[in-house]
Image (cartoon, grey):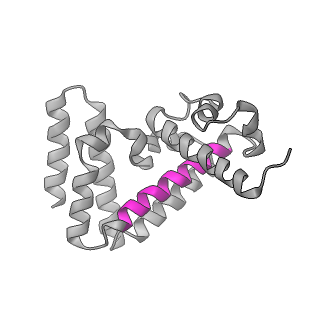
Amino acid sequence: MRYPAKDTAAKHERIVKEASRLFRERGFENVTVGEVMKAAGLTHGAFYAHFGSKQELQEAAVAYGQGLTASRNRSYGGTKKGRRAYADRYLSPRHRDNPGDGCTMAALAQDVARSTPELKSAFEQGFEEILSVSGERKEAIFQTAALLGGIVLARAVQDPQLSEEILRSVQQKLR
C-alpha cells in the first residue's frame, strides 16, 4: 500500500528528528535503528523505505541537528548582546544535563571525527551555516570553540561544583 507523499515526508521527518535526539543523547554506536524507529512510532522494517543505511540516517540526523543549532543561534541575532545571551543559554546546567535537546556539535563531534568523509561533510556544512549566522567569522569560530569546549568539559567531569565552575568561567571569558 502506498502512502500519500505528505504522510511519507512526515514519517521521514519524525525518524530524523528522533534519531537526532537519540544520537545526541547516546552517540551513534549506542543507538540502534530499531530504537530510532520505535521512538518515531514506526516499525523497524519501515526504515529501509526512508534510508539505505544507518550511515545515511546519521548524516540526515547531523544535518537536522546542525540546522536546529543555526536556527537557535539566528534567533539571538548577530549582535554582541545576542551572542552573550546565546552563550548564557548554551553554557547552562539545562543544556549540560540534556544533550538530547542540545547542540549536535557538542554531543557528536568526537563521533563524527572518527567517522566517514560523508558524515564529516554533513557536519561541516552545518558548521558553516552556524558560522554564517554568528557574525564575524574569526570571532564566531572562537566563540563556537569556547562554547563547545565548555559544555563538553562540564559534561565530562563528575564533580558538580567543578562542572558549574567550568560553565561560569567560560561565560565570563566570553563576555
Q: Residue at x 56, y 40 (%)?
A: 19
| Placement of the N terminus among the 4 image quadrants | top right
Q: Residue at x 33, y 49 (%)?
A: 148
- Measured as percent of width and height from the top left, residue 4 is found at 77, 55
- Front-most of residues 46 and 83: 46
- Measured as percent of width and height from the top left, residue 13 is found at 61, 51
| Placement of the C terminus among the 4 image quadrants | bottom left
- Measured as percent of width and height from the top left, residue 88 is found at 21, 54
Q: Residue 25, relative to residue 138: is it above or below?
A: above
- Measured as percent of width and height from the top left, residue 81 is found at 20, 69
- In screen coordinates, is 53 left or right of 93? right
Q: Residue 80, relative to residue 102: is it above or below?
A: below
Q: Main secondary structure of the magenta part?
A: helix
- Front-most of residues 20 and 5: 5
Q: Residue at x 35, y 38 (%)?
A: 98
Q: Which residues are magenta?
A: 56-74
Q: Residue 81, relative to residue 96: is it above or below?
A: below
Magenta run includes residue 73: yes
- In screen coordinates, is 25 left or right of 12? left
- In screen coordinates, is 89 left or right of 108? left
Magenta run includes residue 26: no
